Amino acid sequence: PDPKVGDEYEIHVNVKDISTLAKNYQITTTDGKLVIVDNKPKIEADDISIIYGQAEKELTAKVTKAEEGHPLASPNDFTLSRAEGDDAKEYKISITLNPQSDNVQYYEAKRGITLVEGTYTIEKYSVAFTWSELSGSYTKNAQYPTAEITTKAKATDVVSLKTYSPYD
């Protein structure tokens, strides 16, 4: 049967004419093991993280185990895309192979290509509200509570604050 990734084979060392060699050499042999490992090229989408309201980052990937003369590069051999949306949450980054690419055809005919999806994370933007402290007794010119808003929210996000007097 054809070897598969993870298969193990014992290797035994046999030396021809060991008695002749042993006259002048001290000979030591050690048996070993052969383990079949995955040798497919791998395209792994990079994980990306931004904060809500920041500009989108370019999708990128790492390519490993590609043979010299048969590189795998975006956008000729594959494209990266992420699920749509701009809310603060995680989105899957997908890899799509170009079936017309000579390099993709080369690897698919030989042993395939391993694709590893990534994650595009949009983190929540932090907004802080700080209320001023009040002290003293009621007068006609009473001090009203005030608030200071610290944020860089997008212009499309409306943050409003209403101040009112508890004495109205």
Image (cartoon, helix red, strand yellow):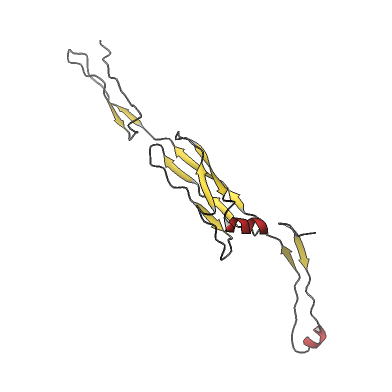
58 vs 28: above or below: above
Q: Residue at x 30, y 23 (%)?
A: 161
Q: Residue at x 47, y 47 (%)?
A: 59
Tell me, yes or no, if residue 34 can be seen here: yes
Single out the residue that lies furthest toward the left.
141
Question: 70 or 82: nearer the eye?
Answer: 70
Quadrant occupied by the C terminus: top left
Question: 143 or 31: nearer the eye?
Answer: 31
Using residue 3 as the reference point, say whether residue 39 is left or right of it: left
Q: Position of residue 83 (x, y in %)?
A: 51, 38
- Figure quadrant of residue 36: bottom right
Tell me, yes or no, if residue 111 can be seen here: no
Using residue 63 as the reference point, say whether residue 6 is left or right of it: right
Q: Position of residue 70 (x, y in %)?
A: 57, 62
Q: Position of residue 30 (x, y in %)?
A: 75, 73
Number of marks drawn: 0
Q: Position of residue 29 (x, y in %)?
A: 75, 76
Question: 63 or 14: nearer the eye?
Answer: 63
Quadrant occupied by the N terminus: bottom right
Single out the residue that lies furthest toward the top.
168
Question: 77 or 40: nearer the eye?
Answer: 77
Single out the residue that lies furthest toward the front.
100
